[in-house]
Image: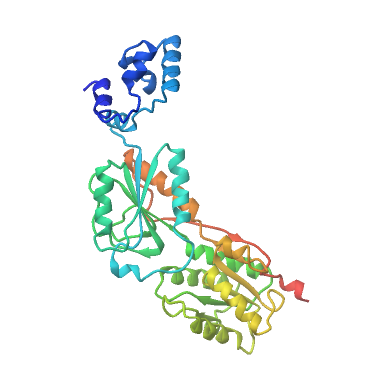
Amino acid sequence: MSDTDVIDNFDHERVMMPTIYDVAKQAGVSPKTVSRVINNDAPVKDSTREAVENAIADLGYIPSSAARALRSQRSGLIGVIKGAISAADHAADVRGLPDSFLIQGVQQAAEQAGKILMVADTGGMDDGFAKLVRLFQQYRAEGLIYVSEFHQKIELPMQPEHCPIVLLNCFDERHTPAIVPDDAFGQYELVCNMLAKGHRRIAYITLPEDIIATRLRLSGYRAALAEAGIDFDAKLVATGYTDRSNDIRDLWQALEQVLNQPNPPTALCCGNDEMAMRVYGMLRTRGVRIPEAISVAGYDNHTQIAETLYPTLTTAELPYVEMGKLAINMLLNQEDGENPMISPRVVSGETVWRDSVLARACLK
């Protein structure tokens, strides 16, 4: 099939749109020459190229990306699937940064690589994932990225055939290429920074215990204390939300537990920034000033919360944008036949230092 035939197949329905033949007629050249100018795949005289480009501009001709994709065997499209992969998972939402930040990173890297994203949500339907995989494959997507709303272990309902896939913010037992945040290091670095500020009694109010991030962050918390030669005190750790309903009564109970100690904490870590925002209000109702009486830190670096609280909130970053960028690179490496990196790939964030944590020396 020639270039002219390919392009003609995609121009059956003109709807008054100029075609490659119109451009060729106005420029006084053949459709084949117009195709060469558009695709830059063969030498053309400068005067001829200028004539074709002027005709394209005058007529407002838009080249067919579908035709070019058919010739190159590459569509330039990347499918992004977000949302729960089954109705049962839909209730397992954990509040935190929205998945739009992950997709933002994917979008930035895709644009740099010259790819176009198609984004769709499963709607929590049992067959939602499989339907979207089939749909994206019909559009000849070069690869797929599944985006999870929180760090979790998943089981894909199906494995796409002849189409690479990357899991973003989740992982599975099949060692599907995946990218997840380094929750353990994030909490470790945050606590290390608080220790460096002179705090020795650091409490921790966690998210539900069955969440992977909670277990990892708790291990990072304990590792930082151990490294500083401080014994772990179980009375300084409480579960702020016992389930995923985020019941405020659970948080009140947890806060009372860690504060009502013979030797109370001077600093408090919260499971996420949303929890820290609630803790701010609770402490104020008790007449406890932040950070003068107690320092408070969150987790996420949800800037809409962290930067609007007073004092502004010190927090550990979830590196969602960077994770999204890496997902595209991992996907394209698979497509080019390269072996994927160690899976899951763990990405570290950093402590974002603001005003809610005060050095102990400042209190003297």
User: Relative to residue 80, is residue 38 depicted above or below?
Assistant: above
Task: Where is residue 145? Give x, y as percent.
Answer: 35, 51
Please determine whether, in this image, residue 81 is positioned above or below residue 45: below
Could you say which is closer to the camera, residue 119 or residue 232? Answer: 119
Q: Quadrant of the N terminus?
A: top left
Identify the image quadrant of residue 232.
Answer: bottom right
Q: Residue at x 57, y 79 (%)?
A: 231
Q: Residue at x 44, y 48 (%)?
A: 106
Q: Foreground residue, 82 or 47? A: 47
Image check: 328 left or right of 295?
left
- Horizontally, residue 220 falls left or right of residue 329, namely right
Looking at the image, is 17 positioned above or below residue 114?
Answer: above
- How far from the left and from the top, in percent, is residue 359? 71, 70
Q: Position of residue 228 (x, y in %)?
A: 61, 71
Can you see residue 239?
A: yes
Name which quarter of the figure residue 174 lies in: bottom left
